């Protein structure tokens, strides 16, 4: 066997251990030899060990021996094959080396070795000839193989000078190209500096105008501007940021993303009998070459109006009972059978000539347009106050997702002005009609103003954000109108109308026969006024309507309120006529009566005068007095009417007619 230091060592294959290498092999061997662990018991194993030691059990090694012999034969064969292949490779290498040596030696036997020492040259040639193999000497004579140069070298001194000149030229050209590249890079850098300066000038202008410039959440290396509202709906809050990218000329390109559908505005239109009678104006579209801060402002306004459109659509689905209908393009509120208020989202890029020319402009649509924006902004302030001050969420979280009261407020305010005008016109017409009939004490007063809450009156209370929110909500939801009707010094009617937004929207009226307590004063003044008003109430005579025709606490609309006022005025007037006729005629048989025909004055001998206030075909109030008296065996009657714009009674007052009727005057 070769030593371990020999490069070619032939060792026998290592003999493997017959013991199992791992647990898996052990389990496999037990299953194969014993039929599983169930057949292996301690007692049986001890018996086999004892028998093996005594020599009573012969272990079958035949199969193992045969396998080992076959393995040894295979190993020996493999070793022999490897040895033969190794020796063959050695022989091939030896033959190749000898052939190379013969070639070099034969070549050197003819060519000169160019050694200055002739003796040394002769020795080298003899050494070359001695290295030739005897077989080659017999086959090939000495000096039969030679070598020479085919062509002489073309590298001359002039060519070397040319190569140096060419190399110098290439180097000069490289230097010139480097200089040109540096100059071009400097020019490009200067141009980029100008573009960057222009870009950052626009960015600073946006930042100085109060806009929040920050890095984009998903692109940290890109600047963006936030133009939305932190308290908006999530759909608009998360998309109200736009990248500020640089154009080729250095200007800033505002990528609007979600609000990139163009500049849009909510528009309010009022149609009557299918024709537009009022409409909110649309602003001009901001041009593309406008300053960056103007384009950011336009994007903010567009996002705001898109959110406003989204919120009023949510709210419109809950206002079907108020005749509010919505579809994909518009929201329509049917004020009456002829008048419709329409809300749309208009694109400012489209020409504003698709609507009719408006000849009668009331500017109410413009007011509602501004009012709706104010309500959405107020909703944002309420969300901010709730988010920053509320320690825990309310148990009913659905309240936080309720739509804003925007269309509700518009409907309620429209009905407020409409019903207030109805009541005011009704009272003015009633007073003029009573004065036409000779009731000089008739008078009316009205006042429409938002009543300030008590918490904003005194200076002792420190104002905060919550108080301001409450005050604005009070102004939005507590618009009130006060009306006072005087029929006689004793019979006075006080009405107060105010809007209700939640849970139902509209205008309700409270009617009282005594003045309402003042609400515009606070602190000590309110106490003094309350005591003064209570003292005046004690001095004033009682109102006859308290027992004769008392009002309800609240009336749901102007129609019900005016109906009560008309009926109360009829009874107060009949009572006044009764007292005046009784005083002038000194008749105790003249009384006030109220039958199914209405209130009136009755006297002896079936004399009767019934008072009524109705509306004619023109919608104007008409005061009528229907008299009856006994004429011979028949009952005669006559009807007298007074209207504010004409005199049908021939210049006579209603008091004179009642006195004549109670006297049975033949002129009747």
Image (cartoon, rainbow, N blue to C red):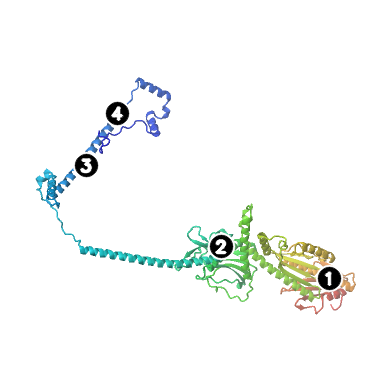
Badge nearest the viewer, 3 or 2: 3
Identify whether 102 is placed above or below 274. Answer: above
Q: Quadrant of residue 486?
A: bottom right
Residue where numbered disc 4 is placed = 65
C-alpha distance separating marks 3 and 4 = 36 Å
Tell me the residue at 18%/59% (across/down). Answer: 153
The mark that comes first in sequence, 2 or 4, is: 4
Disc 2 crowd rating (10 Å Cα; few below 14, some 14-19, many 20+) is: many
User: Residue 37, percent across and down?
Assistant: 42, 29
Residue where numbered disc 2 is placed = 228
Residue where numbered disc 3 is placed = 89
Q: Quadrant of residue 186?
A: bottom left
C-alpha distance separating marks 3 and 2 = 85 Å
Badge nearest the viewer, 3 or 1: 3
User: Residue 526, percent across and down?
Assistant: 77, 63
C-alpha distance separating marks 1 and 4 = 145 Å
Q: Quadrant of residue 501?
A: bottom right
Secondary element type, mark 3: helix
C-alpha distance separating marks 1 and 2 = 66 Å
Tell me the residue at 18%/45% (across/down). Answer: 97
Secondary element type, mark 4: helix
Residue 540 placement, left or right of 124: right
Q: Quadrant of the C terminus?
A: bottom right
Badge nearest the viewer, 1 or 4: 4
User: Residue 623, percent across and down?
Assistant: 78, 73
The mark that comes first in sequence, 1 or 2, is: 2
The mark that comes first in sequence, 1 or 4, is: 4
Is residue 23 visible to the viewer in this orientation of the structure? Answer: yes
Disc 3 crowd rating (10 Å Cα; few below 14, some 14-19, many 20+) is: few
Residue where numbered disc 1 is placed = 576
Secondary element type, mark 1: helix
């Amino acid at each position: 066997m070769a030593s371990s230091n020999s490069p070619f060592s032939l060792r026998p294959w290592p003999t493997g251990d017959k013991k199992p290498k791992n647990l898996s092999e052990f389990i496999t061997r037990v299953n194969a030899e014993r039929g599983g662990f169930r057949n292996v018991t301690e007692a049986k194993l001890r018996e086999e060990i004892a028998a093996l030691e005594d020599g009573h059990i012969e272990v079958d090694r035949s199969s193992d021996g045969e396998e080992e012999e076959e393995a040894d034969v295979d190993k020996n064969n493999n070793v022999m094959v490897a040895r033969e292949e190794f020796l063959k490779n050695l022989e091939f290498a030896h033959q190749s080396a000898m052939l190379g040596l013969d070639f070099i030696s034969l070549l050197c036997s003819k060519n000169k070795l160019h050694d200055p020492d002739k003796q040394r040259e002769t020795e080298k040639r003899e050494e070359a000839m001695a290295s030739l193999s005897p077989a080659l000497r017999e086959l090939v004579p000495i000096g039969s193989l030679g070598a020479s140069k085919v062509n002489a070298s073309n590298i001359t001194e002039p060519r070397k000078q040319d190569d140096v000149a060419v190399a110098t030229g290439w180097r000069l050209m490289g230097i010139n190209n480097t200089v040109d590249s540096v100059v071009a890079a400097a020019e490009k850098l200067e141009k980029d500096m100008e573009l960057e300066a222009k870009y950052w000038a626009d960015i600073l202008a946006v930042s100085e105008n109060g806009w929040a410039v920050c890095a984009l959440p998903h692109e940290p290396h890109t600047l963006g501007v936030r133009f939305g509202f932190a308290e908006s709906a999530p759909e608009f809050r998360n998309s109200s940021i736009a990248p500020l990218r640089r154009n080729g000329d250095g200007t800033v390109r505002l990528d609007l993303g979600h609000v990139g559908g163009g500049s849009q505005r909510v528009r309010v239109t009022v149609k009557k009998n299918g024709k537009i009678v009022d409409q909110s104006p649309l602003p001009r579209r901001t041009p593309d070459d406008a300053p960056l801060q103007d384009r950011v402002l336009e994007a903010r306004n567009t996002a705001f109006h898109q959110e406003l459109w989204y919120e009023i659509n949510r709210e419109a689905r809950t206002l079907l009972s108020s005749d509010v209908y919505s579809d994909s393009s518009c929201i329509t509120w049917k004020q009456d059978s002829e008048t419709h208020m329409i809300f749309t989202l208009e694109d400012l890029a489209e020409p504003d000539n698709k609507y009719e020319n408006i000849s009668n402009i009331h500017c109410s649509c413009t007011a509602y347009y501004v009012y709706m924006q104010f309500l959405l902004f107020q909703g944002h302030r309420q969300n901010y106050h709730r988010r920053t001050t509320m320690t825990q969420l309310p148990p009913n979280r659905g309240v936080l997702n309720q739509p804003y009261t925007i269309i509700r407020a518009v409907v309620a305010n429209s009905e407020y002005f409409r019903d207030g005008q109805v009541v005011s016109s009704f009272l003015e017409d009633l007073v003029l009609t009573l004065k036409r009939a000779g009731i000089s004490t008739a008078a009316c007063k009205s006042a429409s103003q938002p009543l300030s809450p008590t918490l904003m009156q005194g200076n002792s209370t420190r104002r905060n954000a919550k108080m301001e929110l409450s005050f604005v909500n009070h102004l939005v939801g507590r618009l009130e109108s006060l009306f006072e009707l005087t029929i006689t010094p004793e019979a006075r009617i006080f009405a107060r109308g105010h809007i209700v937004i939640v849970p139902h929207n509209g205008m309700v009226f409270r009617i009282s026969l005594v003045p309402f307590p003042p609400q515009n004063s606070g602190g000590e003044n309110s106490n003094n006024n309350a005591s003064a008003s209570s003292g005046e109430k004690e001095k004033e005579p009682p109102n006859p309507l308290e027992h004769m025709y008392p009002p309800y606490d609240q009336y749901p609309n102007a129609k019900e309120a005016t109906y009560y006022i008309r009926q109360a005025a009829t009874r107060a007037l009949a009572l006044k006529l009764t007292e005046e006729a009784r005083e002038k005629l000194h008749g105790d048989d003249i009384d006030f009566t109220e039958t199914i025909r209405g209130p009136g004055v009755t006297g002896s001998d079936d004399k009767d005068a019934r008072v009524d206030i109705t509306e004619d075909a023109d919608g104007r109030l008409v005061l009528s007095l229907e008299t009856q008296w006994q004429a011979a065996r028949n009952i005669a009657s006559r009807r007298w009417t007074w209207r504010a714009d004409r005199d049908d009674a021939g210049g006579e007052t209603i008091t004179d007619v009642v006195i004549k009727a109670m006297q049975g005057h033949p002129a009747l």
